[in-house]
Structure formats: C-alpha cells, structure tokens
Image: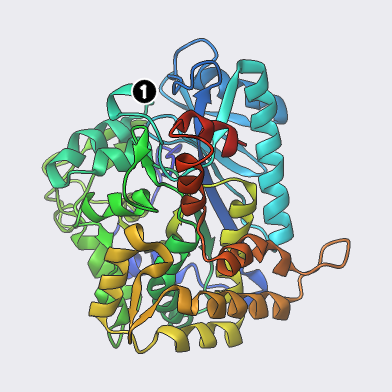
Amino acid sequence: MSTRTDSGDHDPVIENRDQLIAAFSKGEKPKDRWRIGTEHEKFVYNRRDHHAPSYEEKGGIHTLLIGLTRYGWNPVFEGENIIALSGTDGTISLEPAGQLELSGAPLENLHQTCAETGRHLEQVKYVGDMLGLGFLGLGMWPDKTRAELPIMPKGRYEIMLRHMPRVGSMGLDMMLRTCTIQTNLDYGSEADMAQKFRTSLALQPLATALFANSPFTEGKPNGFLSYRSHIWSDTDPGRTGMLPFVFEDGFGYERYADYALDVPMYFVYRDGKYIDASGHSFRDFLDGRLSVLPGEKPTEKDWEDHLSTAFPEVRMKSFLEMRGADGGPWNRICALPALWVGLLYDQGALDAAWDVVKDWTMEERQILRDSVPKLGLDAPIGGGRKLRDIAAQVVDIARSGLASRARLNGAGDNETGYLSFLDEVVASGKTNAERLLERYHSEWQGDLSKVYEEESF
C-alpha cells in the first residue's frame, strides 16, 4: 500500500469534475515512454523460531530498515518512526504486519526489472543474515494466526484495521497475513486503456491460477490453492471485485471516476497525520460536507490517495495495476511482469489476448473469479473448458509480444526467458501450491516448518 510523505499544503483544490478525470488522462504516454513498475512483498521471520518480528524488538523491522540504509536508501518518517525507505530503485515500505515491500522504479524493460529485483533481494538477504532474519515467498502466512502477528506504526493502517471488520470477515487477513506480486503498466490513450483494462481484468484469474502459492493456513492445508485470492472475496465488497462496468460500451476515464467516487473513504491526510474518514463519501467531500473536515474540499492529492484505497482485481491510477498474483520468490517476481508486458505492450499480442476472452459473459467471468482460488487451472471458463485449456495459448501470446518488443540484454537475449517459470507450470499442469501440498503430504510428513526451507529467499 502506498506511503504518503508530503503534506500537500500547496496541492490544487478540486474545483470541477475535469480534475478527477485528469488523474487518469495524465497517465497517457507515447509507446516509447511506456514503463514497467513491479511491486513485490515478502514475509519477514526470525530464523531461530520463525516468529514474525515486531517493529520495536531488537533485530526487528525497524532495525532491518536501518540496516538497509547502508545501500543508499533514505529513511521516510511518519512522526518519529521510520516507515519506509526511498532510493533509486523505488520505495521500500511496510505492509500492516511487517511484510516488506519493494515498489520498484518505472523501468524500460524486463532485464532492468529483474536486475532491480535481484539487487533488492541481495540487500535484504545480507542485512537479514546479520540480524537472523529470513524472508518467505508465499501468498499467505502458512502458520500464523492473526494474534501472533505484530502491527506496524502507520496511521493509515490503524484506521483500516478498525474499519475492516465492519465490512467483511477477512479484511484483517488481507492486511496481516497476505503477500502479493503486482505489475504497473502504462497506456497510450483512453481507448488503449480500455482495451488493456478489459483484457487484463478478464485474464486476471489466469494469473491467480498460474501464480497460486497460498495453500496453508495456521499450520495445515486450507483447501485452496490461492487462499490469498479467496480472502479478497469477503474483504470489502464496496472496493473489490471484477468491475462489470469495465466491459460495458463507452467505458473510459469518467466511468472509472464514478466508480471511485462511490468507493467509501478510509482517511484524509493532513499535517502529517491520518484523519479517520472511514465509510464517508468522497462525493460529500467534493461538496465541502465531509463531517471530519467541515467546509474543506479535497485536493488533487486527496483524490490520488482515495484511488489507492480501491482494491479491484485491476486498478487504475495514472497507470493500470495488475493485482491477481500470490507472492513468491525471484523467478516468479520476474515472471509476472513478463506475462503482462508480453500481453499488453504489443498491439498484436493485445489483440490476440482480447480475442481469447472477448466472448466471455459477465456471469462466466464471475464464476471463473469465484472458483479459481480453490480450483486453480481447473477453474471453468465456459463451453465445458478449463483455464488450463487456454494457459499455454495465453503464455505463447505473451511470448510473441515480448519477442516483438525485441528488448535485448548485453548477451543479446530478449525478454522471453522470463516466462520460464510459467512454461514449467503449463507443461506440468501443476501450480506451486500443488507442489507444496504434495511435499507436505509426502516427504515433509505434515511438518509445515519445512516450507521455510523450501520457499525462503
């Protein structure tokens, strides 16, 4: 989740609807300026006993952040607490229970993305080794209850933790017990955005299946392949889901703005502090009728903050954010942007990917979204078929898109090699979640502590 660092004192006040829409239109870029932003989270644990370290404890999360400053990262404060780090490779931030996230810099190609990932993981591993900390690449804590997890000292999270139980049964699990990999991609126009949004939203369940990696809860199998994805089904219906309106004729920036206006608020940031506005209406804020800030109207930064509190499967800010994948180790962090860049950044590949999904009904898309956390590649897609029946085709379309981009590294290799993890999943027909379950029931003999050896960085 984003980290607010500026006061916004000089930010323009929203006076008209055009300013809302401009938050999206300003993201339009010519193709040669399209970039790749990759975000990835990992669980931090103490190697001695696998507990999740608190912010304050010796050798804990605060100490980890301090240790990473040796690599040129600059501390970001909220009050007296360091809650993030900024640097040339983007931002390192904390999720609510201490999950460590890199929000990478906007980069030109996947070679740079994967190199950035490698640098980050080398850095956290070096500092972690000094502190006795390890990093786990899964979509959900495999063995921790909510009560066993610490809370990070961020005002935004205090508000969300209070609000989540009011609107769903699993919002606290989303905040405290999950990790994801996400990719942020650009668009060239409103029409380009709409085609990319529709295609990626329809195919997001395929990404969930291919990257499924959260089959355990509190020490035992949970009956799902991506429990992280299942958690989103009852987190907060007012800000999650498959957004049927995206597939309607005329969809564009204005329609998404209307959707975002109807997403209930969480907070307003003023003078370095988060003011609880949970459940209030941004429409009231526009009219100066927000009870927690009577008479005040929102700024453009308030609108940007509000957009970050919607959590659909694909989210729009001034770019499109792919949100369907479980957390995982290095090869998966490289594979997720490879999939989406291949599908969305070459027009021929984008058209081919849209052809795969364009005839799906909303009912079929919803059934697919609802069934994929449990069934993975066996989830139904209509016509008696399953996701696995199109997986190879979609990955091959991504490969053609990457080959067409022809972005080469120093050795003369293009970007298609980053799909190798997905090639293995498609060829075997088994997700990583299924592989872990097989090992749990066989060689691990039900000892889930072995997962720390298997899935750590």
Question: Camera-side residue: 110 or 93?
Answer: 110
Question: Camera-side residue: 355 or 39?
Answer: 355
Q: Which quadrant is home to the N terminus?
A: top left
Q: What percent of the width, then of the height, locates residue 73?
A: 64, 32
Q: Residue at x 37, y 31 (%)?
A: 272
Q: Which quadrant is home to the C terminus?
A: top right
Please identify the quarter of the rendering in which residue 292 is found: top left
Q: What percent of the width, then of the height, locates residue 167?
A: 15, 47
Q: In this view, does 139 lie above or below 20?
A: above
Q: Residue at x 30, y 53 (%)?
A: 230
* Residue 145 is at least partly visible in this image: yes
Side of 371 where 332 appears, left or right: right
Please identify the quarter of the rendering in which residue 425 is found: bottom right
Question: Camera-side residue: 298 or 254?
Answer: 254
Q: Residue at x 28, y 24 (%)?
A: 147
* Residue 196 is at least partly visible in this image: no
Q: What percent of the width, then of the height, locates residue 34?
A: 61, 69
Side of 148 where 107 appears, left or right: right
- What's under tag 1, amino acid-wise? Pro
Q: Is residue 3 above or below residue 226?
A: above
Q: Name the residue under label 1.
A: 150
Q: In this view, does 78 lie above or below 291?
A: above
Q: Dot 1: few (<14), some (14–19), or many (≥20) neighbours within 10 Å?
A: some
